[in-house]
Amino acid sequence: MLGIVVVSYGSASLLRANLADVDVTALRRPATVVVVDNYKGARERAAVRAVTAEQGWELVENSTNAGFGAAVDTGVARAAALGATAVVVVNPDARVAVDVLDALADAVAASPRTLVSPRVERPDGRPWFTGGALDVAGGRTRNVEAPPTPLATGWLSGACLAADVGEWARVGGFDDDYFLYWEDVDLSVRWTAAGGTLQVRHDLVAVHDVGGTQETAGSAAKSPTYYRYNCRNRLVFAAKNLPARDVRRWLWRTPAYAWQVLLRGGRRQLLRPVRPVWAVVRGSVEGVGWAVRALVRPASRPVRTEVAA
């Protein structure tokens, strides 16, 4: 059985727009849809209950906003309990056709230790994710055109991701410490460290309405949550995965990186800078705390030296 796992946070309208059109009975295998709803409010909870009941989906209700990674892990566990041997994790603002879901499930069945992503495009056809590289020297990640073959380096986006359930459990799934953003980079690194590989299937396409889950959808500006956790989790990742010399390098580059993250929301938002700037500063300070603690109490961490060309 295939489990299709979707995390919702006030996303009832996106579930109707993107997931309700997926006829799981048309798949070449039994399938179940598991929606994990992170609590946003009574009205949103009622809306998600309504759409899941209409569609016959499995609903898991979190009493709080547990974050993306924790909610995905909950959804994978529920799918496994229902009999799923493979899962496709899909953002509620992404559309994935039935034939693509089938092909992703086939790929995982053929190679259980391979984590698989389709090529992800924007609604206008422009590429959004075609592969990820970890630039340790630069203290950042990069989007690249990954080769179609499985690799033991790089990272895959959590916007659409297929995995074998047993391997997901063996690697440990997403790390709850991230809450949102960078958890997919961390999972990819741990997946390959555990002997697995990563693959981008460029012949399979998912369509991602980028930012559809954010409060600022429809504008260039990003939410304070986006700014905070992108800045925070870059250093959480470094603290958990990089040797001390690289943690120090990433710390040194934090102000420049924070400015780059802020500019992703455009310069117009700087006319009213308090919320976005505060979110960037808060996240950076939190991340610095993680990095400093890792330097003060060093643990055995793998050396990651992959640098994008």
Image (spheres, rainbow, N blue to C red):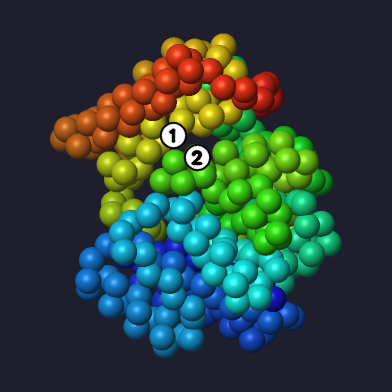
User: 193 above or below 51?
Assistant: above
**Picture coordinates of residue 265 (x, y %)?**
33, 39
Please give left or right for residue 80 compared with residue 260 in the image.
right
Instruction: Identify the mark at residue 212; answer none if there is no mark.
Output: none
Quadrant in the picture for residue 100 = bottom right
Can the viewer see residue 100 in this picture?
A: no
Please give left or right for residue 5 compared with residue 92 in the image.
right
Q: Image point 66% across, 72% down: which residue?
A: 84
User: 41 above or below 274?
Assistant: below
Can the viewer see residue 237 in this picture?
A: yes
What amino acid type should be assigned to the residue bearing mark 2?
Answer: Trp
What amino acid type should be assigned to the residue bearing mark 1?
Answer: Asn
Disc 1 element = helix
Mark 2 residue crowding within 10 angstroms, few (<14) / some (14–19) / many (20+): many
User: 239 above or below 203?
Assistant: above
**Picture coordinates of residue 203 (x, y %)?**
74, 58
Q: Measure how far apart labels 1 and 2 are at the Cα level.
A: 6 Å
Kindly identify which residue carries mark 2: 182
- Please state, as top left, top right, bottom left or bottom right, where the C terminus lies in the image: top right
**Picture coordinates of residue 218 (x, y %)?**
32, 55
**Picture coordinates of residue 41 (x, y %)?**
23, 66
Viewer-nearest residue: 95 or 242: 242
Q: Are circles 1 and 2 on residues that touch, CB within 8 Å?
A: yes
Q: Earlier in the sequence, mark 1 or mark 2?
A: 2
Disc 2 element = loop
Kindly identify which residue carries mark 1: 233
Q: Image point 62% across, 24% down: which residue?
A: 301
Q: Image point 37% across, 54% down: which residue?
A: 66
